[in-house]
């Protein structure tokens, strides 16, 4: 299990990743929690819906696949 916390002006993010063997594969359980720390942060966090999350996961998948193909890490981003 890996835990990560990030803070930026107005909002905080907690990420937990848990990996488990599933036969020949590995399953990942990913949990995000976002908290607004100000009115602006609350406004930002309130826009995080299913569509936003799907786009975030698509970007995450591309970044992981790129790393696996090139061995180079992409820049860290909030979204």
Image (tube, rainbow, N blue to C red):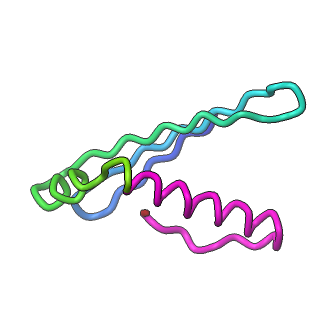
What is the span of residues highlighted in magenta in the rendered image? 52-78
Q: Residue at x 76, y 73 (%)?
A: 72
Q: Number of marks in the image?
A: 0
Foreground of the two, 79 or 9: 79
The extreme front residue here reads 51
Q: Does the stretch in magenta take in 57? A: yes
78 displayed left or right of 75:
left
In the rendered image, the residue lying farthest to the right is: 24
Q: Pick the residue in front: 15 or 64.
A: 64
Q: Is residue 73 magenta?
A: yes
Rendered location of residue 79, percent (x, y): 43, 63
Q: Which quadrant of the view contains residue 3?
A: top right
Looking at the picture, how far across and down is residue 63, in whole percent?
65, 65
Q: Residue at x 21, y 50 (%)?
A: 36
Horizontal side, residue 74 vs residue 8: left or right: right
Q: What x and y, as percent, mark residue 51?
A: 38, 54
Instruction: In the rendered view, tell whether residue 23 sits above or below residue 42.
Output: above
Main SS category, magenta section: helix
Give the farthest residue toward the left.
39
**Rendered residue at 27%/45% (across/down):** 35
Q: Is residue 29 left or right of residue 55?
A: right
How far across and down, in percent of the image, does residue 49 sit? 31, 49
Instruction: Tell me what residue is drawn at x 17 percent, y 52 percent.
Output: 42
Q: Is residue 15 above or below residue 65?
A: above
Q: Quadrant of the N terminus?
A: top right
Front in this rendered view, residue 11 or 20 = 20
- State left or right for residue 29 relative to residue 71: left
């Amino acid at each position: 299990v890996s835990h990560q916390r990030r803070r930026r002006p107005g909002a905080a993010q907690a990420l937990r990743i848990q990996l488990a063997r599933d036969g020949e594969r590995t399953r990942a359980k990913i949990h995000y929690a976002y908290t607004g720390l100000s009115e602006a942060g609350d406004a930002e966090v309130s826009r995080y819906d299913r569509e936003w999350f799907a786009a975030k996961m698509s970007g995450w998948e591309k970044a992981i696949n790129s790393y696996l193909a090139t061995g180079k890490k992409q820049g860290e981003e909030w979204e």
